[in-house]
Amino acid sequence: MKFKNLCGHYTTITRHRHEVIKNCQKAGIFWQGLGHDLSKYMPEEFLQGVKYYLGTRSPNEQERIECGYSRAWMHHKGRNKHHFEYWTDYSPVTRRLEPVKMPLRYVIEMFCDRMAASKIYNGSSYTDASPLEYFLRGKNGRFIHPETSRFLERLLRMLAAKGEDYTFAWIRWYLSRHEDY
């Protein structure tokens, strides 16, 4: 295990987590943000992250290239409700695995997470359009409930067009008046 990878991975996931907490506070879900991504510090995720650390993108991507899948991601997505991949279940109607509509507060955390990841990985080239651009690149291959996808895209488009202050104010307003989307 390289010391450089250990320090780099720890620093990256901690900076990301702190950025998400800050975003969650702005969105009005501070307490939820405090629990964000704690599983990344568990050995099942942390050690894989150190092993495949690159610094410019998620180590899960490199692990997939080398192994065909990511053990760390499999562990992570099953423990973190802000990932749409967590929200799948077998439908009693189709008897197939189907995406489930996410609860509102987890979609908001997912928005905060995507924004933070874009800031961390894009660095000085980040713009308020960066999270939307990333979302749109993978949109067609995503296994996500259509309503969840539409609501997340709405937030990302709002961020790109009107900026952080407006979007977070709108989210706080929306959360104060709605339990669903």
Image: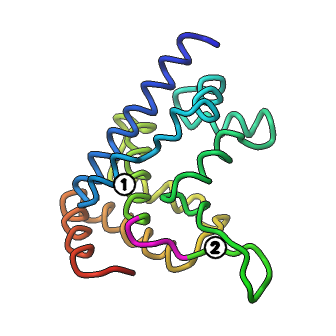
At x 36%, y 68%, the residue is 155
Q: What kind of residue is marked 1?
A: Cys
Q: Residue 112, which numbered label?
A: 1
Residue 65: quarter of image: top right
Number of disc labels: 2
What secondary structure characterizes most of the magenta part? loop
Colour scheme shown = rainbow
Q: CA distance from mark 2 to mark 1?
A: 21 Å
The spot of residue 124 in percent (x, y) is 34, 35
Tag 2 near tag 1, CB within 8 Å: no
Q: Verify whether residue 104 appears in magenta.
A: yes
What range is drawn magenta here?
Answer: 101-105
Q: Residue 99, which numbered label?
A: 2
Name the residue at the bottom extreme.
93
Q: What kind of residue is marked 2?
A: Pro
At x 24%, y 52%, the residue is 25
Taking 120 as reference, is 107 above or below it? below
Taking 50 as reference, is 65 above or below it? below
Q: Earlier in the sequence, mark 2 or mark 1?
A: 2
Residue 11: quarter of image: top left
Q: Quadrant of the N terminus?
A: top right
